[in-house]
Amino acid sequence: MANNNNETIGISAEFALCLLFNLSESLERHRIDLNITEQFIESSVVDVFIAENLLLTKHQGKSNGIVDFYGESNGNSKTVSLKTLMGKGDGKICPQGGQLTYRSFHTHFNCLIPEGNLANPTSEERQIHNRVRWKFIQNNVGYFLNKMQEQTFCCDYTLLISNCKGIPEPQILKNKNLDFTTINISYTYENYQEKERKGQDNTEFSTNVFGDLNGERVKIGEFQFHFKKKNGGGRNVIKFRFYKSFFM
């Protein structure tokens, strides 16, 4: 049995859909948890497709592109993206390309930083560079969130399956189609900071993002700056994820 991490759950869900729609696939069996696959098959996922009049016709997920499945609705070809969440509560949804390494962040966004090692910076370089990156994100947050929204809904349908460690709850996630450049944005932490913890390396910086919508302060998502620990673990990566509740 595979380990029940996010990757295993996602692949097991893909396998379940392939079985339900009798699609050929080339998924690696050692990465699939058949118990989770059975739970997906026994869930209400088929009812979601019936409600949308959507039939899956081809599995594409192993290519690691933006499309997981191709389908057909009312005679028209459709693309489908599959996203899974372990828990039942307010999980966090990662957009396509929502996890960028320090180096790829500068490839995707025109953010210039002081000279230094981008891939494996020293602790001092990392903190200097990440303050510049965080300020760049804040100065361009409307554009950044628009991009993340676009990459979350990069397909015709975004199928979200929540509570994957219990009774799976499938739904079609709907795009709010907001223009975040017109919204007042605020944060739990305005300034980049790495807090010290006794007996541990510096913690990774994270902050919630809020937007003023219809007079209410609404939680949109979370930014996280991860970095390699002194003992060799972790990755240098900047991550953004939307909260599920934001789309409800």
Image: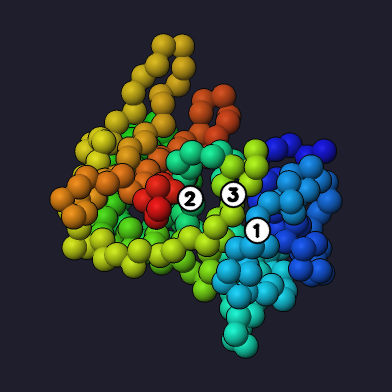
Residue at image coords 69%, 69%: 60
Residue at image coords 63%, 47%: 168
Q: Nearer the viewer, mark 1 or mark 2?
A: 1
Image coordinates for residue 158, horizontal then vertical, percent: 53, 64
Residue in the foreground of this view, choosing between 95 and 194: 95
Image coordinates for residue 90, horizontal then vertical, percent: 45, 41
Residue in the foreground of this view, choosing between 156 and 112: 156
Vertical order, 248 against 198 (above or below): below
Q: Is residue 171 left or right of residue 177?
A: right
Scheme of image coloration: rainbow
Disc 3 marks which residue?
Answer: 169
Residue in the foreground of this view, choosing between 160 and 5: 160
Secondary structure category for the residue under label 1: helix
* Label pair 1/3, CB-CB below 8 angstroms: no
Using the numbered discs, state the Cα–Cα distance from disc 3 to disc 2 in whole angstroms.
Answer: 15 Å
Residue in the foreground of this view, choosing between 26 and 90: 90
Q: Is residue 25 left or right of residue 4?
A: right
Q: What amino acid is labelled 1 in the image?
A: Val
Secondary structure category for the residue under label 2: strand
One can see residue 151 in this view: no
Vertical order, 180 against 202 (above or below): below
Disc 1 marks which residue?
Answer: 45
Q: On residue 93, which mark appears?
A: 2
Vertical order, 108 against 226 (above or below): below
